[in-house]
Image: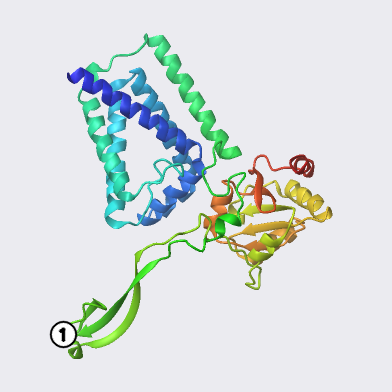
Amino acid sequence: MMKWISNISRLLVGVLFIISGLIKANDTLGFSYKLLEYFEIFHVGFLNSYAVTFSMLICIFEIASGAALLLGVYSKINAWLLLILIVFFTLLTGYSDITHKVTDCGCFGDALKLTPFTSFMKDVVLLLLILIVFFNTKYLHPLFNKVIMNISLFVILLVSCFFTFYTFMFMPVKDFLPYKIGNNIQALTLIPEDAEKDVFEMVFVYEKAGQTFEFLADSLPEDLDAYNFIARKDKLIKEGFKPPIHDFKLYDANAIEYTDSMFAAEGYQLILVQTKIEDSRKGIETAMGNTAKEWMESGKKVWALTASNLSDANAYASKNNLPFTYYNMDAIPLKSMVRSNPGMLLLKNNVVIKKWGAYNLPTYKTLQKYMN
């Protein structure tokens, strides 16, 4: 009986780790953003520059360890590593559930959003399954002979490394974000007339004998005259409809918004995204500028978006002879638009036609092919 339970646990853990690793490896940069959130919470900012490296290593480890578990190779050391990892993640998701400082653990990237409680319960179940595996490795027999097993694991390790680096350099194979190819950006910013709205309740703040009290409108104390009124505030009790894209706003150096101007333009437009110019890939300014120059000479608009200070951004543009002016946008939508820094999006009537990352930025001829 224990043999069957151990092997079922082995199957479930192995498959789940491979799936989790592949989904995260599909968007290593996105997973690194989640790690940065945790680094900030735990005040370990010195690790920020290693976020992408940690992201890649975790993805590769999850895929390789899941495969090793299924194959039945290196069972004892693999069980130890899995146990250490799941204990760490259980503590992490448990902390998130208690504090709600991170609302999504990023366990399955943007493909599947989990609440802190769901993430924690998922890790608790995984912990139990891994404990079964850990204490019953004697039942985890290899599927093939040692030579075939080692070759299989080596090939899986190579493929997972290749896939992880490929998606980092050339962006996710499967895009789960609202700015994916085929989506109309403007349409996803709109709120339907019949959409459910936020529900608030009034909270009254009073002071009495040096203590602060909060009361709802229908639960004010009978001796209200004995309290000093401090303030009235609205408390959100139910969140209404929120459009998939709710933070797409761009401004010029004078804080004038140009979002409507961009959406109103017809035909093709090119968006250049440089979330933080100081962190963007170096050495591609000439190619980037040449593409933009030819594009603008054809009478079309380049929207260069950044979260960096516009004075610094436009000084960078002047230094590198870039023919466009930068606009400001919050870093969060920029990171969602394209998992690269820099990156480009080709739009037609606000619909995303194609996206490129820093390692394969298009020439003007390439853009023409997609326009045709």
Please give left or right for residue 34 compared with residue 272 in the image: left
Which residue ends up furthest to the bottom in the rendered image? Answer: 225
**94 or 201, which lies in front?**
201
- Horizontal and vertical percent position of residue 74: 33, 20
Q: Quadrant of the N terminus?
A: top left
Under circle 1, the secondary element is loop
Figure quadrant of residue 146: top left
- Please determine whether, in this image, residue 13 is positioned above or below residue 341: above
The crowding category of the residue bearing disc 1, from other C-alpha atoms within 10 Å (few below 14, some 14 to 19, many at least 20), is few
Residue 366 in view (yes/no): yes
Task: Tell me residue 53's x, y (percent).
Answer: 48, 40
| Amino acid type assigned to the residue bearing label 1 in the image | Glu
**Which colour scheme appears in the figure?**
rainbow
Q: Which part of the image, by quadrant, shows the C terminus?
A: top right
Q: Is residue 258 above or below residue 52?
A: below
Residue shown at the point (28%, 45%) measured from the top left: 120
Going by the picture, which residue comes out furthest to the right?
297
Query: 110 or 288, which lies in front?
Result: 110
